[in-house]
Amino acid sequence: MSRIVMKFGGTSVGSVERINHVADIVKAELDLGNQIVVVLSAMSGETDRLINLTKDLSDNFPSSEYDVVISSGEQTSAGFLAGLLSSKGIKAQSRMGWQIPIITNDDFRSARIKAIHSEEILNLLESNEVVVIPGFQGITSEGRITTLGRGGSDTSAVAIAAAIEADFCDIYTDVDGVYTSDPNKVPNAKRLDKISYEEMLEMSSLGAKVLQTRSVETAMNNNVVLRVLSSFSDLSEGKKGTLVCSENGISDKKIVTGVTSSSADAKLTLKGIKDKPGVAAEILGVLADNGINVDMIVQNISDDRRTTDLTYTVPVDESDKAKKLMEDLSSNLSYKDLIVDSNISKISIIGVGMRSNAGVASQMFRVLSQNNINIDVISTSEIKISVLISRDLTERALNMLHEHFELGKITE
Ligand code: ASP
Ligand code: MG
């Protein structure tokens, strides 16, 4: 017997037909003698619909009530499935985030889970109930409803799996696993059988959309074994999917495991700013004070030791705000020009094997140069290299890098 948390995303519960199929998948696990907790997203499109309604009502809709509204899509899904299972004679009960409770901090719209009281879930499992819990929602210690940020149901599932010490946390979605690259852009992309937490964390934060980044972080910190599976495949096909686990569980380590792209950033360049101590601190300080996350930063060495150029990236929806802040600083910094460019794409190669293999960066840059792709900005960490390029070259860069690092040959 295993204890399994099964999480189904928005498309997996997107219609009456899909919810029925979810019930079949749950029943199949139950028939194997497993204990099951189900965590659900809102039906696809529902969260967006609710968000738009709050916007129509007011452009400064308070965050605490916003969370009350947008957490409701998940409540509906949980009620639907628990009701459907019960009507089929399968013992099932729903519990909302606040009933469990799943305690979070009071960062409305993107709260963090602080604690989960697992006692009632465990009691229900002991009496052979399927426990159906809406993802995405929590409650503050003051009793206010919170949500965990877009895509947050993944994090709910992983955190619940950690709290009840589940053997697996199965994330069911509309693709059958994690791919070496986005199959919509790279036709030759292959499904990975296994990927390490560290790599998955980089893949998620650098553009792969399968899992919410925070859910991977939570899984890594708590050693929750994740399986990414499709709810669209036929039950008879068995479980293909991708296992996300610790590096020790992976024997054939590749140098590069995946190639991602992201068009979520905009690039700001301040030309001809004074080259003196404190300038970068001032610019980045202002951005930090205004809650704007800076990702990549480059500052050039100046020719004349008097002026230099500074380039950085911020989330594209914050670029107007960043631009305004830079304009406010202009008398202080006396730069010559400010250029905002959102026509960019960040391409990254990721792999734990990079730790022990030199020369991966130079291979990446060579592949790009041979394809006439100009690199604007570079940033690296132990297991990834990212470059900024012009957005229209995204697919070419992805495909060329995918081919060079032989990712199409990875599995099967
Ligand atoms: N329904 C929420 C969203 O669309 C949370 C989730 O699906 O994970 O972001
Ligand atoms: Mg999702």
Image (cartoon, rainbow, N blue to C red):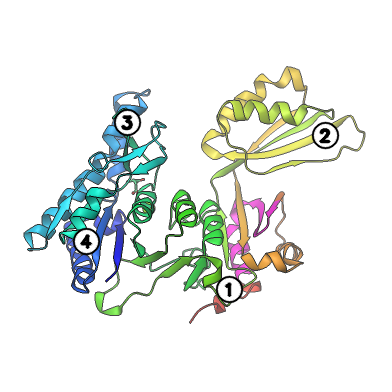
- Is 122 left, or right, of 307 in this rendering? left
The residue tagged 1 is: 407
Report the number of discs. 4
Q: Which residues are magenta?
A: 379-402
- Of pointers 1 and 3, the one earlier in the residue sequence: 3
Residue drawn at (64%, 25%) of the image:
286
Task: Locate the N terminus by quadrant.
Answer: bottom left
The residue tagged 4 is: 18
Mark 2 and 1 residues: CB-CB less than 8 Å, in contact?
no
The residue tagged 3 is: 66
Which quadrant of the figure has residue 210? Answer: bottom left
Q: Residues within 10 Å of mark 1 (few under 14, many from 20)?
A: many
Callout 2 secondary element: strand
Residue 308's disc is 2
- Is 317 left, or right, of 100 in this rendering? right
Q: Residues within 10 Å of mark 3 (few under 14, many from 20)?
A: many
Foreground mark, 1 or 3, reads 3
Residue situated furthest right in the rendering: 304
Which quadrant of the figure has residue 50? Answer: top left
- Is 224 left, or right, of 204 in this rendering? left
Image coordinates for residue 37, horizontal then vertical, percent = 25, 58
How far is the residue under mark 3 from the one under mark 2?
44 Å
Which amino acid type is shown beneath numbered disc 3? Tyr
Q: Residues within 10 Å of mark 2 (few under 14, many from 20)?
A: some
